Amino acid sequence: MVEHATGWWITGEGSGHLTATLRGNISPSELGEGSLEISVSHSALNYKDALALTGSRGVVRQTPLIPGIDAVGSVVSCSESSFHLGDSVVLTGWGYGEQRHGGLATRIRADPGHVLALPAGLTPEQAASIGTAGFTAALAMTKLQTAGLTPESCTKPIAVTGAAGAVGSFCIFLLAQAGFRVTAITGRTDEQEYLRGLGATEVLSRQEVLTQAGKPLSKELYSGVIDQAGGELLATLLACTASDGVVVACGLAGGTDLPATVMPFILRGVSLMGVNSVTQSREIRRETWDRWASLAPTVPWEKITKVIGLDEVEEYAPRVIAGLTRGRVVVEVAA
Ligand SMILES: NC(=O)c1ccc[n+]([C@@H]2O[C@H](COP(=O)([O-])OP(=O)(O)OC[C@H]3O[C@@H](n4cnc5c(N)ncnc54)[C@H](OP(=O)(O)O)[C@@H]3O)[C@@H](O)[C@H]2O)c1
């Protein structure tokens, strides 16, 4: 008997409306290419996935599409690869859930070069919690550290925007673990206790920070910034960054524009760097996942992670876009 997959299926032609449906009858011939087939146990609801599920054409590069930029599960079929049946694996980025079928279904077909063995010390649920968000947070941390910032060299804290979201939560945790002082910038100051629990030393409201918007230079407040917002908030924080400070842009939750001047760069020597989690090398992925595995016993998983079922994805997607979910939304794909 042919085994069918259950998963989210986005359809829509041309520039027309996109529709997401939960199908229980995705046939093997509809799963696409890839010599490694994985039985998916967990995925996640990333910002990108929420955009795809709510009809954003910027993320959905092919239709039909199974969304889900992250997948964790076990190998059920592999030809010509270094993996074996039953191996636990993790997959993030590489265009899955955007231009080829992703992880929000019980089966995914992948290229072996895109897949990593699940590191010892992480459960599948924990790996899905980390997923693209934790990977991105770790890459952003590495950018700051490679640029020379250390807890000792920083006279001022590191600001993290989108603080109560997924990438922001992991950034706060990683920075605090490494010994940095962290200012969490959030639209939800009622999450103060959560943010301090992750290691933030100060919590500021986004609105308060934005009272400084529009100035080419403001008081030097931060030695570094990890930004999830873009737009006016990123521009405002560039102007508040101390001399020789480093700003890492990860996201666009507040907009894709950057209404800034060159003053922070030429008068304070501020550096602006970017992070792209999608196409990182296998070596960087391996190192980053091993780092997370070593940190696993110290991560407050129950605070950061909310687990939902595959059938709850449609309900949660607009909440992710509205910034109403806290930390990381993990999807239990195969109950
Ligand atoms: N560069 C990469 O490779 C990469 C990888 C992963 C994610 N990203 C991007 O990073 C961003 C965050 O991803 P995520 O997974 O953490 O998403 P998320 O869990 O939905 O968190 C986004 C957070 O952004 C904040 N936010 C919402 N609306 C905002 C606005 N209008 N202005 C400023 N901040 C706003 C909110 O923080 P508060 O709740 O604290 O207010 C929200 O929780 C997204 O844009 C995503 O696409 C990029």
Image (cartoon, rainbow, N blue to C red):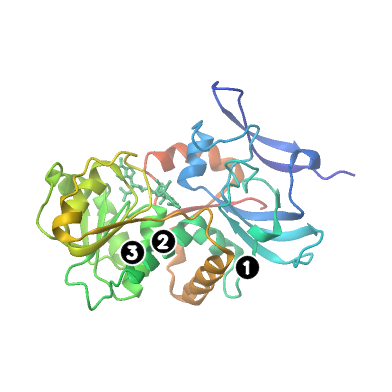
Pointer 1 or 3: first along the chain: 1
Residue at image location 63% in from the left, 37% down from the top: 65
The residues bearing labels 2 and 3 have C-alpha atoms spaced at a distance of 9 Å
Q: Position of residue 199 (x, y in %)?
A: 30, 68
Q: Up-down: is 152 above or below 117?
A: below
Q: Amino acid at mark 3?
A: Ile
Mark 3 burial class by Cα count in 10 Å: few <14, some 14-19, many 20+: many
Residue at image location 58% in from the left, 22% down from the top: 14
Q: Report if the beta carbon of the residue with label 3 is closer than 8 angstroms to ligand 1.
A: no
Q: Amino acid at mark 2?
A: Ala
Tell me, yes or no, whether the two marked residues, 2 and 1, touch with CB atoms within 8 Å. Answer: no
Report the side of 84 relative to 232 (left or right): right
Q: Position of residue 170 (x, y in %)?
A: 40, 62
Q: Which mark identifies residue 60?
A: none
Report the side of 280 relative to 169 (left or right): right
Secondary element at tag 1 = loop
Q: Which mark identifies residue 172?
A: 3
For label 2, the residue is 137
Q: Amino acid at mark 1?
A: Leu
Mark 2 burial class by Cα count in 10 Å: few <14, some 14-19, many 20+: many
Report the side of 256 relative to 79 (left or right): left
Pointer 2 or 1: first along the chain: 1
Residue at image location 69% in from the left, 35% down from the top: 23
